[in-house]
Amino acid sequence: MKRKYFLIGIFLMLVMFSTGCSGIIPSNNISPEAENFIGEWKAINPTRLSKVEIYSFGNNIYIHVWQKGNPDHPEDYDWGEQNFKISDLFNGVIKLHWEYFSNSSYDQEMEVLNNGVLKVRSTVTYNDQDVSSSYTDYFYNSEADNSFIPDILGVGLYQEDPEFVNLVYQLDSPDKICQYMEKYFSYKVLNGPHSPYQTYLSKEGDCADHAVFANNIAHFHGYESNYVHIEWTNGNAHAIVVYDMGDHYIYSSVARYFSQSFNSILECVNHCTSRFGYILSNYEVFDWDYYNYRNITVR
């Protein structure tokens, strides 16, 4: 009997020792700030990245990142894995540096927003030229308790975010939409454009992001609107939204709302062109859902 208890004791000691050597920290020993990052994160309307997996081991967090493929390379690009010391978490932000592609490097900041969405902001710097640009991807954790699950069929609007749903209801005219964008959005050239919800979360974007945001919400409220792409002879391009008011047209450019009456879409384009002091080269008119951020519905 003594030998039996002795063997059991030895077994328990071995289990405890092997657990300690593995460095695994039970989840209840990880700070809540770090625990928020753990999980398999799937992209919401990916701009560049498609998936992020994050797990903890010992005193570190391990981050595995994939970039979405393209027509020439349909499979996702596997960037590999980096580790980050839990003690280095500062204000809930993970900072990483990647050199996956030979001609560029990436600096990333990851944070979990209040609604449980993982925000990943990436800044790419090209090695052969002194140029950099930024883009933002958002992810949801399908394995989390009370997970934020986006309505994939209605990629422009997510029913589970009541603040955004309420905002869409309130912005019931082009004027109100532009006032909101002017007050809360910052103009920044990004790779995109982003969906209305992504722009709502990031509060930044260029003319295309503003146009997609305004176009989708205006259509939700019954406005007949078009995304208009403008090209000028100096090589610059711009995007505006033109609203068909029945007997006349109005338009918005970024967050600026022009309420005067125009007789055609071309008049709106010419007015916008003259404001910039450029010469029109070409313009194209697209449906409101040109970028497929469609089906804004509220159950």
Image: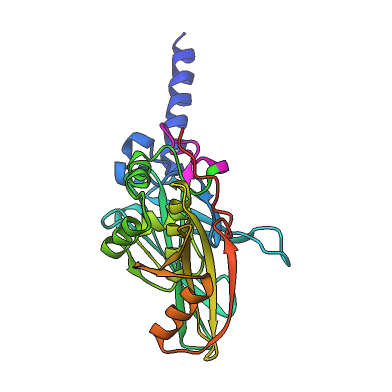
Can residue 208 be seen? Answer: no
Rendering colour mode? rainbow
Q: Residue at x 47, y 84 (%)?
A: 131
Q: Residue at x 46, y 30 (%)?
A: 15
Can residue 220 be seen? Answer: yes
Q: Position of residue 287 (x, y in %)?
A: 58, 59
Q: Position of residue 163 (x, y in %)?
A: 32, 42
Q: Position of residue 133 (x, y in %)?
A: 46, 75
Label the magenta part by its dominant secondary structure: loop
Q: Which residues are magenta?
A: 140-153
How many marks are shown on the rendered structure?
Answer: 0
Give the image quarter of residue 132. bottom left
In the image, 160 versus 237, the foreground residue is 237
* In magenta segment, residue 147: yes
Q: Position of residue 109 (x, y in %)?
A: 38, 62
Q: Is residue 8 above or below residue 296?
A: above
Q: Is residue 185 above or below residue 200?
A: below
Q: Residue at x 47, y 37 (%)?
A: 18
Residue at the limit of the structure toward the right, as seen here = 72
Q: Seen in the image, is 174 located left or right of residue 143? A: left
Q: Seen in the image, is 86 located left or right of residue 190? A: left
